[in-house]
Image (cartoon, rainbow, N blue to C red):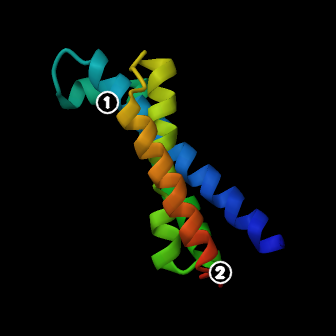
Amino acid sequence: MENFFAIAFWLLVSTLSGSIGAIYLKKAMNKMPSFTFKNIATSIDFYIGAFLYIVSAQTNIQLYKHLDYSIGFPMTSIGYIWTILISYFVFKEKITKEKILAIALIVIGIAFLGSAGGVS
């Protein structure tokens, strides 16, 4: 059971930080009048997004200590669910029937992967 909590923790931190990082990078790009080095270097949103991507990569490494790569990597698709939900609240994007179906398929796929084992 200890491994379950470690897997859940690293999966949550990895996918959430990656999704939030992507949101910050999008916010940074939306605020830039043009894509230049100066605009990137002076964008706090860019730095937050890049930092969160690094956190996501580091926590992915921790996740793979507990799961086979063939199980762990597909489980990170949970990040797509976070992205849909966060985009709804931050950018006021609509959650369509197709997005709900996609979320359901991701959850079903992860449930199958979880039952397949692969815990190291």
The residue under label 2 is which amino acid type? Val
Where on the picture, by quarter, is residue 62?
A: bottom right
Other residues around mark 1 within 10 Å, as few (<14) / some (14–19) / many (≥20): few
Which quadrant does the C terminus fall into?
A: bottom right
The residue under label 1 is which amino acid type? Ala
Q: What label sits on residue 41 in the rendered view?
A: 1
Which residue is disc 2 drawn over? 119
Q: Where is residue 74 in the image (x, y as percent from the top left)?
A: 45, 65
Q: Is residue 22 visible?
A: yes
Other residues around mark 2 within 10 Å, as few (<14) / some (14–19) / many (≥20): some
Q: Is residue 27 above or below residue 81?
A: above
Q: Which of 31 and 60 is in front in this view?
A: 60
Q: What element carries label 1?
A: helix
Q: Can residue 42 be seen in this view?
A: no
Q: Position of residue 72 (x, y in %)?
A: 53, 70
Calculate the distance from the C-alpha at mark 2 to the C-alpha at mark 1.
41 Å
Q: What element carries label 2?
A: loop
Q: Residue at x 50, y 47 (%)?
A: 104
Q: Residue at x 28, y 29 (%)?
A: 40
Where on the picture, by quarter, is residue 84?
A: top left
